[in-house]
Image (tube, helix red, strand yellow):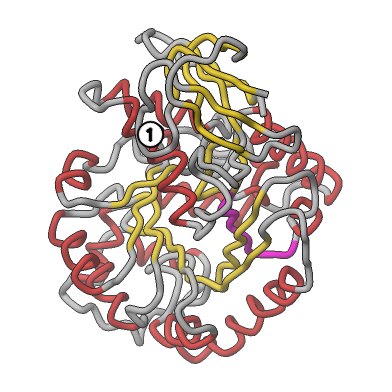
Amino acid sequence: MIITADRIHNGKEWLPQGSAIEVAEDGTIISIINGSHPGAVHFEGVLTPGFVNAHCHLELSHMKGVVKEHTGLIPFLMHIPQHRNDFTAEQKKTARHAAYDELLANGVVAIGDISNTADTVDLRVRDKMHFHTFIEALGFNDAHAPGNFSYALGAYNDYSAQESKQKILRQTIVPHAPYSVSSSLFRLIDAHEDGVLISIHNQESEDENIYYKTKQGGVPALLNLFSIDDASFVPSGKSSLQTYLDWMSPQHPFIFVHNTCSRRDDVQYAHSRLKNAYWCLCPNANLYIENKLPDIDMLISEGANICIGTDSLSSNHQLCIISELYSIKKNLPHLDWGMLFMWATYNGAKALQMQDAIGTIDAGKKPGILQVKGLEATDKKPEVQRII
C-alpha cells in the first residue's frame, strides 16, 4: 500500500511536498518515496507517526472528576490517597480498560505508565501498545527505606515476569517525587539496576523547592496529614532537583515530569550532570491542578529534549496527546506544529528508549501512522485517526 497526504511529518521533520509512504500489510514501513506517485492513496491533512504518551497513570483512571480543578498540588495530593480506594476492584478495572481504549483511539502506540501496584499487569498484554512501566517507590522516612523498596520490588517482579514477542514490555523502579522519597530510598532505587531509565515527578509545585531550601511551605502539612515524620530531613538550601540528583548516578537516563516550577539553573544543572535528560510536559494536568504551565520557551532555549504525557484521569479530562499539543499551541502560538509533533513522536520514543521500533516513519519500523486534520483551526483541537 502506498499512502500520501497534504503534508507528512516523519517524526523529526516535514517531508518534501508530494512524498509518499510504502507500507506493508502488517504496518511495517517499506520505503519513503520522494516525488509524486500516481497510485498513492491520498489522505486529507497531515500524516504522522503514532503518538508516545511518556507519562500516564492508568491505575488512577477510576478517579476521573474526583478532585476538583485548580486546587493546587498539595490539596490535590491530599485527596488522591484518601479517595483512591473508594471504589470496588471491578470499578477500577473497568475504568483502566476504558482508559486504555481511549489511548488507542487517540493514536497512542507507546506509554510510560506509572504504577504503585501491579494493577495494570493485564493491560500490558493487550493489543500492540508498547509499555515501559515505572513502578514508584514511596517513603520519606530513612529508617523505613528497605521496607518501602521491598514493596516496590514486589510489583516490579510481577511486571518483569511478563514477556512478549509482539511488542516492547519493560519496567524499572523509580522515585515518585522529591517530597515523598527519602535520600536512603533514592539510593536504594539508584543501586537496583545500573543505568536504567528513571522517571520522576519533578518541581510540580513551588512548595517542593521551598521545602528543600527551607523546610517550609505546604509540604510539611502534607506529610503531617499522613503521619510522616520528617524530623531527619535537613534542607539543602538548594532546589529539589539540584539536591536529589546528587543521590543518583549520572549514568541513569532521566525523564523529568511536569517541571511546572523548574528554572533555568535547574535545567542547566541537570544537563551538566546527566548524559540523557528528557523533560516531559503534561500541560492539561498542570492547568487542571495548578492552573499554570512550565516555562516552555526557557526549556527550548536550553536545548531540552521535550516529550509529552497526559498524567492521569484524576488530573485530566481526557487521555489525548493531540489535546496536550493543542493546549501548548494555544498558549504559545509561535511554536510550529512540526516541533510539537516531534515532541509527541520521536522525542517520546527516545525518552522511553523505543526509537528503534517507533517514533519515526523509517523503513523497517512499525510506528503506526496517524491522520491529523484541522491544524489550521485556532478554536478547536485537531482531529486524529489512526489509519495504520
Q: Position of residue 99 (x, y in %)?
A: 69, 37
| Most foreground residue, 156 or 344 | 344
Q: Position of residue 85 (x, y in %)?
A: 72, 53
Quadrant of the rendering where the C terminus is positioned: top right
- Looking at the image, which residue sits at the far right? 90
Q: Position of residue 20 (x, y in %)?
A: 51, 22
Residue 114 is one of the magenta-drawn residues = yes
Quadrant of the rendering where the N terminus is positioned: top right
On screen, 255 above or below 288? below
Q: Which residue is mark 1?
A: 287
Residue 378 is one of the magenta-drawn residues = no
Where are the magenta residues, as a range?
111-118
Residue depicted at x 42% and y 65%: 177
Residue depicted at x 56% and y 10%: 38
Say which quarter of the image contains residue 247.
bottom left
| Most foreground residue, 368 or 334 | 368
